[in-house]
Image: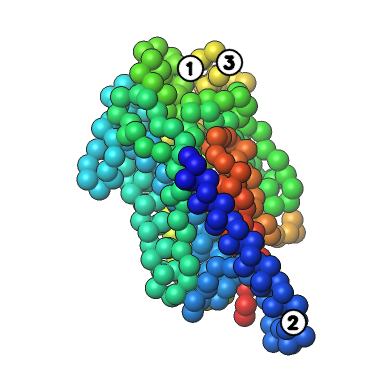
């Protein structure tokens, strides 16, 4: 722990020094800079041959993908197909069975979503490096504990899946034909009791698998969390794409972003198959029966309901939402933090993530 702290500290000292240095250099050349570029001075990271804004966007996305990989690996170790494509863990049969009650293909889908995130992370960093730009590595923040349940690898984690508050408002957001979050609209939770408090999405120890209702509630929590994560990726890539400058970087952002949409659509469908169950204060209702059901809750309404877009005077349109680009990276960080996904992480972890997000949000489309 001491070693980790000192590494982080020396890193942040370096960053502070470099930021000060850049600010001083910027002050001396402010006249010339104002004439040649309207672009903001970016942080200390090297952009190489990339547009600085593009490099900052890719670095934030690399960080997001590293975090996604970390959480998906925890799911895969317990409930995914166990093979060499996604190493680590050995499976938990009780948890796998509870998830499979939503869909027989769960282990395969969990495995494949995990593998996809791994490739996103590795590809973006490899592309950054190929253009001489700094890459992202969060290894020194792998300090959170693993599940003690059978099947989990015992390694340090970046994310915490054991105390989640899962926002399920995407469920009603995508069913509403008159509202759009980019117009400031808000949406009710599909599972209100899951959005508050702290709920495990994986068994924390084997005792979590002995009561059938408790275990099903954990599996249902995971199923909604899968969609919550992937709808976030769905919006994030579309939001950041609007501020990309280079055509090749835009191609990367659109191509990876599209797979986030495919993930979300799959998980949206499956979440609707979560069996009704009550576990203490946590209630998964039958979303097809009163007081639920209807256009807001009916579980097979998984295609995006056409809604208002850009301007209320335009015809309604079937779209992903939100896609407002301003502050999108910081918005994603705050959304994930509010879900307790980073509960137990250090101040320097949040500082580093905030730094990457702020740099990405300073990016401006340069043509
Ligand atoms: Fe991803
Ligand atoms: Fe994803």
Tag 1 residue = 277
Decide: few, some or many residues near mark 3? Use Cα within 10 Å; few <14, some 14-19, many ≥20: few
> Which corner quadrant holds the C terminus?
bottom right
Q: Which residue is nearer to you in this view: 97 or 307?
A: 97
Decide: few, some or many residues near mark 1? Use Cα within 10 Å; few <14, some 14-19, many ≥20: some
Q: Residue at x 60, y 41 (%)?
A: 337
Left or right: residue 362 versus residue 86 is right
Q: Residue at x 31, y 42 (%)?
A: 111
Secondary structure at numbered mark 1: strand
Q: Residue at x 55, y 55 (%)?
A: 10
Q: Is residue 353 visible?
A: no
For ligand 2, tell me if the residue under mark 1 lies within 8 Å.
no
Where does the image place residue 60, in percent across and percent down from the top left? 54, 58
Asked if labels 3 and 1 touch by Cβ distance under 8 angstroms, the answer is: no
**Which mark's residue is nearer the viewer, 2 or 1?**
2
**Which mark's residue is nearer the viewer, 1 or 3?**
3
Residue 281, label in figure: 3
Distance (Cα) linking label 1 and label 3: 11 Å
Secondary structure at numbered mark 2: helix
Secondary structure at numbered mark 3: loop
Distance (Cα) linking label 2 and label 1: 65 Å
Left or right: residue 52 versus residue 143 is right
């Amino acid at each position: 722990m001491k070693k980790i702290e000192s590494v982080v500290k020396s890193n942040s000292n370096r960053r502070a020094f470099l930021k000060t240095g850049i600010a001083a250099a910027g002050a001396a050349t402010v006249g010339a800079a104002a004439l040649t570029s309207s672009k903001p001075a970016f942080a200390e990271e090297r952009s190489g041959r990339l547009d600085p804004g593009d490099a900052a966007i890719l670095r934030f996305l690399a960080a997001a993908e590293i975090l996604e990989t970390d959480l998906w690996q925890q799911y895969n170790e317990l409930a995914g197909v166990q093979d060499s494509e996604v190493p680590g863990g050995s499976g938990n049969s009780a948890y796998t069975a509870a998830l499979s009650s939503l869909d027989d293909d769960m282990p395969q889908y969990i495995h494949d979503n995990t593998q996809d995130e791994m490739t996103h992370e590795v590809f973006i960093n490899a592309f950054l490096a190929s253009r001489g730009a700094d890459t992202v590595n969060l290894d020194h923040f792998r300090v959170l504990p693993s599940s003690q349940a059978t099947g989990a690898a015992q390694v340090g984690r970046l994310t915490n899946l054991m105390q989640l508050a899962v926002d399920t408002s995407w469920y009603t957001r995508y069913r509403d034909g008159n509202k759009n979050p980019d117009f400031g609209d808000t949406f009710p939770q599909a599972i209100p009791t899951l959005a508050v408090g702290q709920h495990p999405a994986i068994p924390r120890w084997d005792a979590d698998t002995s009561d059938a209702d408790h275990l099903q509630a954990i599996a249902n929590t995971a199923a909604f969390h899968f969609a919550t994560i992937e709808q976030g990726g769905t919006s994030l890539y579309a939001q950041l794409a609007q501020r990309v400058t280079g055509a090749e970087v835009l191609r990367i952002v659109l191509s990876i972003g599209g797979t986030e949409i495919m993930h979300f659509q799959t998980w949206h469908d499956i979440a609707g198959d979560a069996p009704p169950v009550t576990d203490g204060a946590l209630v998964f209702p039958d979303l097809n029966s009163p007081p639920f059901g209807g256009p807001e809750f009916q579980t097979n309404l998984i295609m995006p309901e056409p809604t208002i877009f850009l301007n209320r005077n335009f015809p309604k349109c079937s779209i992903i939402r939100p896609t407002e680009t301003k502050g999108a990276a910081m918005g994603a960080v705050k959304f994930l933090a509010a879900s307790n996904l980073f509960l137990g992480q250090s101040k320097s972890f949040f500082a580093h993530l905030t730094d990457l997000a702020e740099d990405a949000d300073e990016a401006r489309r340069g043509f």
